[in-house]
Amino acid sequence: MSKVFVFDHPLIQHKLTYIRDKSTGTKEFRELVDEVAGLMAFEITRDLPLKDVTVETPVGQAASKKIAGKKLGLVPILRAGLGMTDGILRMIPAARVGHVGLYRDPATLKPIEYYVKLPADVEEREFIVIDPMLATGGSAIEAINSLKKRGAKTMKLMCLVAAPEGVEAVQKAHPDVDIFLAALDEKLNEKGYIVPGLGDAGDRLFGTK
Ligand code: PRP
Ligand code: URA
């Protein structure tokens, strides 16, 4: 069974409060999502392996550390995942970025895939699948299926807010994929929205309805 991590860092929790607030406008919402994604990237990369190196400082030699050449890939789920991508890339600038395009059919709530483009060396990379919202879990499950079908071996899932139903569904479908969240909310409503959640992440990020 995969693990679920909820990041309780005060900066993440503080910014999430403003993200949730319905009076937060598009510009501020987008900036806050970007900032929280960067802070979450800091936490999610805690287990990156390091190697020992020596560096010449202006006054001598320092026994130091570098990340041991792990190949990382980010995969935002279009479109709301795009809102988290730049914040993560600022922390991990060498990561490659793939995209999976999915939207939730409003009637069935089932994900419909419309676009997939991944780095060529998909089998060698560790991927972070990114989406602000994990509601029924259908979109995340489908995105991970899509990556696995194309040869991806190692993945993490990073979302801002999740419903217990979505977490359970992803854990059942992909027990090898750990889930990283800023908040685990109460439930889904009858329209498949997370309660209390933050509303429609894509619409709030891009100013659509
Ligand atoms: C939202 C969200 C997730 C999905 C979550 O996307 O960004 O991708 O719903 O719901 P699920 O867990 O029930 O699948 P949406 O389909 O609204 O598309 P958008 O990103 O283009 O707005
Ligand atoms: N997608 C969203 O953007 N918000 C939700 O609460 C559920 C799915």
Image (cartoon, helix red, strand yellow):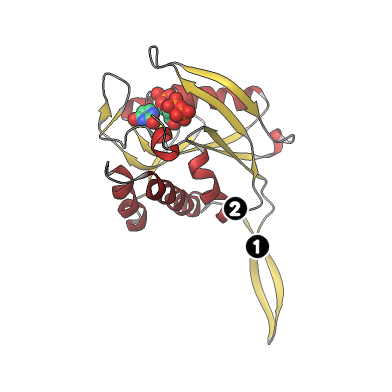
Q: Is residue 23 above or below residue 167?
A: below
Q: Earlier in the sequence, mark 2 or mark 1?
A: 1
Q: Residues within 10 Å of mark 2 (few under 14, many from 20)?
A: some
**Which residue occupies 63% across, 26% down?**
116
The numbered dot on residue 66 is 1
Q: Quadrant of residue 138?
A: top left
Q: Is residue 34 above or below residue 138?
A: below
Label 2 near ligand 1 (CB < 8 Å): no
Query: Disc 1 marks which amino acid?
Result: Lys
Name the secondary structure under disc 2: loop
x%, y% of residue 71?
67, 46
Depth order, front residue of 13/71: 13
Q: Residues within 10 Å of mark 1 (few under 14, many from 20)?
A: few
**As drawn, is 188 to the left or to the right of 55?**
left
x%, y% of residue 70?
66, 49
Ligand 1's quadrant: top left
Name the secondary structure under disc 1: strand
Q: Is residue 206 above or below residue 145?
A: below
**As drawn, is 88 to the left or to the right of 94?**
left
Residue farthest right in this picture: 120
The numbered dot on residue 92 is 2
